[in-house]
Amino acid sequence: MLKAQVVDSLAGQDRASWDALFPDVLEGYDYLTAVERAALPGFRWRYILVSEGDLLVAAAPAFHTDYGLETTLVGAPRRVIESVRRAVPNALTLRLACIGSPCTVTASLGIAARVAEPDRPQLLRVLLEAFEQDAMQARCGLFASKDVIAADRPLWDAAAGPLGYRPIASLPIADLDIDFASLEEYLGRLSAGTRKDMRRKLRALPRVRIEFRTEIDDVLDRVMALYAETRARADMSFENLTADYFRGVTRQMGAGAFYVLYFQDDDLLAANLLLQDDAVLLDKYFLMDAERGRSLNLYFLSWFTNVRLCLERGLERYESGQAAYRNKLRLGSRLTRTSIYFRHRNAVVNGAMQLFAPLFAADPTVGLAA
């Protein structure tokens, strides 16, 4: 018999049991523990656990927060909601319960390998019902998932659809297969114009000093300044990361996380937080001094540094996240489409939100060519 519960910390949970549900996920128990300990303002952490007897068979991280509807919008829809908020400051802010973590790429749903495919929708439905019950006790009105990749949509459609959830398009995930033997072979696959441009940009490399670090205490203030500048430039931002996050991830994850730091003389101009397992390099955050970093082509130097790391470490894929699609497509990445599932507990509000859902689903890759 299935039994679901919701807890507020991973501290009392067995690491091996949790990670066994997420065998190919870099953002596992240790990463989520680091996020939990980072004290991000405005978030309440939840973890939904489904057991069969004494065995954990499904789990997902989740969170509660106050969500302004303009938070993840760009362009005209964002300007409309911001104008409404200026007139009525508390309008269009909803209490949100979300499957996933603000600091993970996807919704992070884990299901035991022994669970047969036909049984998985029922398992997810049990998890969602426990998630909703806990969220209602916290007076959350909006229920959602973080990004669900296209391959998982049939499962979510089968489980969440009957509960009233609707999917809307979210930001694609960019990744590059490391199916080449050298940087020269990789460059040879790019268009002639891109190849010429990248060779020119890489000429800045001798002017930059690169360090690989797991500890950043001596430059933490500078890293936080770079983060604040990078966040201010972003089209959209949700979480506000803390110093405890940036030093805690590498301490908690050991060899699974590290920084690549980019200096000119003794000035730190960029910091790149990366996660790694035996197959994948995941680019979490690239923080840069915009003016000086651009003059040194640091974004592109970091890209080729990371590709080189993949080659040296025998990795199969470089996952570079959910932004800067034009550059990533030029550099040979493919995009994996994602969707957010949502519903509001109030039928009238839910109907209105689902009617206007297309405003929340603008595709930032429209018009971009690979």
Image (cartoon, rainbow, N blue to C red):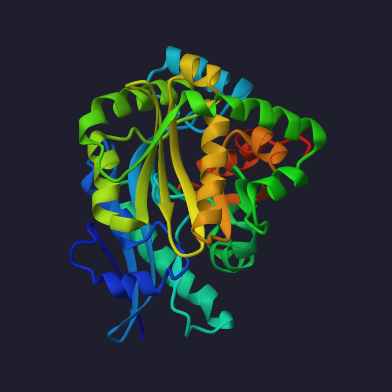
The residue closer to the viewer here, 312 or 86, is: 312
Q: Looking at the rendering, which quadrant does residue 329 occupy?
A: top right
Q: Residue furthest front?
A: 206
Q: Residue furthest left?
A: 12
The residue closer to the viewer here, 45 or 215, is: 215
The residue closer to the viewer here, 298 or 146, is: 298
Q: Is residue 138 visible?
A: no
Q: Position of residue 145 (x, y in %)?
A: 48, 52
Image point (26%, 29%), residue name: 219
Image point (34%, 32%), residue name: 240
Image point (34%, 64%), residue name: 48
Image point (34%, 41%), residue name: 65
Q: Quadrant of the N terminus?
A: bottom left
Q: Looking at the rendering, which quadrant does residue 330 occupy?
A: top right
Q: Position of residue 19 (x, y in %)?
A: 36, 70
Q: Quadrant of the C terminus?
A: top right
Q: How many marks?
A: 0
Q: Residue furthest right?
A: 192
Q: Would you place residue 107 above or below residue 344 in this image?
A: below
The residue closer to the viewer here, 172 or 270, is: 270
Q: Position of residue 301 (x, y in %)?
A: 54, 33
Q: Position of residue 137 (x, y in %)?
A: 28, 53
Q: Would you place residue 117 above or below residue 352 in this image?
A: below
Q: Would you place residue 263 above or below residue 60 in this image?
A: above
Q: Is residue 282 visible?
A: yes
